[in-house]
Image (tube, rainbow, N blue to C red):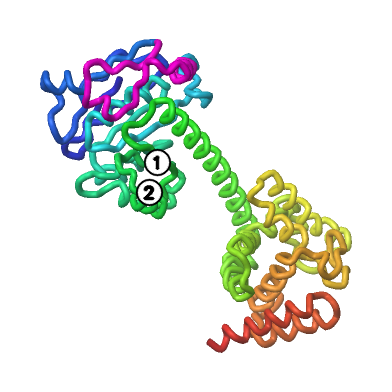
Amino acid sequence: MIQWKSNHTGFTEQIVSGSNPISTVKSIGSNRAVGSQNDVEAYSLGLSKENLMVKDNQAVSSWIKVDVNCGDDSLVSRTLQAEGSKVNGFDLDPPKVLVVDDHAASRITAVALLGVEGYEVIEADSGSSVIGLVTQKQPDLILLDVMMPGMDGFQVCQLLKQDEQTRLIPVIFITALNDRRSRIRGIEVGADDFLTKPFDRVELAARVKSLVRQKRLNEDLDHAEQVLFSIAMSIESRDPNTGNHCERLVKLGQVFGEYLNLSRYQIRDLRWGGYLHDIGKVGIPDAVLLKKGKLTPEDWKIMQQHVLIGEKICQPLRSMRGVIPIIRHHHERWDGSGYPDGLKEDEIPYLAQIFQLIDIYDALTSERPYKRAFTSAEALSVMQEEADSGWRNPKLMQQFAEFIVYFTLL
């Protein structure tokens, strides 16, 4: 067991880790003393290898449901404890759980229960100390009391969920409040689950395990997405001629998507398409990608492979399913003369049709070494000629022109 003092007054962190059952959890620092003989008698817990028993302790029993006659609960508890160092099936690195409660008895109970299950437990006795502690310790889950002096649990949860760095950490509200209003308020600030005092040890273990696993899956997905975006931005940086092309496409996709009344997910896919549409160029040799002058027919065949390469890169991620049609088909043409599949008219995915318009418009209105930046009117004229020749969806082209004129005149 490791104990250290925080800079916060009255705050002590106690880490309990490992698979061996804890025989006794003694004192924990809080705003009130817990070290007296009476307090020790009131708050100490005895934990055997077979089960968790609360001895002569009415204060602790108010925080935990104990039913020694319940065979199912005892069996489940023994089964969970038997897993030992596997920490409920997780990797050898034990998940961290932050317990936030101004009542020492509640914290002691959570520390004891989660410590037996192999979690690393961190404690805080006030809401004001949580934000800094979360940044420092990076817990996998937070058990958060609602009713605390100063900053309450609702305020803490709202701050955590608004921060990009902490929004993925699951928050379970531990509260004695059963009223509907409190639960609605908890949902509004982003709580992931609720447990009511006194809580059941098996239910606590099951919910913590489930949310920690979900958090780690979400983190893996988030990291994979960020890697893709980083690759895409590095590709853009290889070509000094495009400037901030991707960022402009993201912003234009957002506004045009809203203009077309697309769903939130469609707009998100358009935005992601702005970053990822050319990610496949990572597989195109510099001799072709950065070639000055006109591409040969052989060079052009190589260049066209970037949409297929990009599709393969993003395909393993389920969250990219809405973006993949943009990546693969943003060079198709309405008359079927595009690539890679020669799709015609509405065979071309709708978001790919939308994206190619904003992609072309940005290219025309941006300065390149081989051309000046066209005005909006000039760019729309060129694009309308392409639509008249059969390359673009005429109805969508009209909507795009109206959109550009509308926002240009604002």
Tally the numbered discs.
2
At mark 2, the secondary structure is helix
Mark 1 element type:
strand
- Residue shown at 47%/16% (left/top)? 75
- Residue farthest toward the top in the current orientation of the protein: 49
Circle on res. 318: none
Q: What residue does disc 1 label?
A: 194
**Residue 404: percent from the left, percent from the top?**
63, 82
Residue 122 lies in the magenta-colored region: no
C-alpha distance separating marks 1 and 2:
8 Å
Confirm whether residue 85 shows in the render: no
Q: Residue drawn at (30%, 13%), measured in percent from left and top? A: 23
> Above or below — where is 193 with respect to 43?
below
Can the viewer see residue 322?
Answer: yes
Please indicate whether residue 93 sits to the left or right of residue 315 in the image.
left
**Label 2 neighbourhood size at 10 Å, few (<14), some (14-19), many (20+)?**
some
Which residue type does callout 1 highlight? Phe
Corner quadrant of residue 144: top left
> Few, some or many C-alpha atoms within 10 Å of disc 1 (few <14, some 14-19, many ≥20)?
some
Q: Are marks 1 and 2 in contact (CB under 8 Å)?
A: yes
Task: Name the quadrant containing residue 295.
Answer: bottom right
Residue 84 left/right relative to 366: left
List x then y, in percent, for residue 73.
Answer: 44, 20
The span picked out in magenta is 50-79
**Magenta residue check for 61:** yes
Name the residue nearer the viewer: 202 or 24: 202
Name the mark on residue 183: 2
Q: Which is more N-terminal, label 2 or label 1?
A: 2
Q: Amino acid at mark 2?
A: Arg
In the rendering, at what x and y percent does residue 185 appear? 36, 53
Q: Is residue 318 left or right of residue 204?
A: right
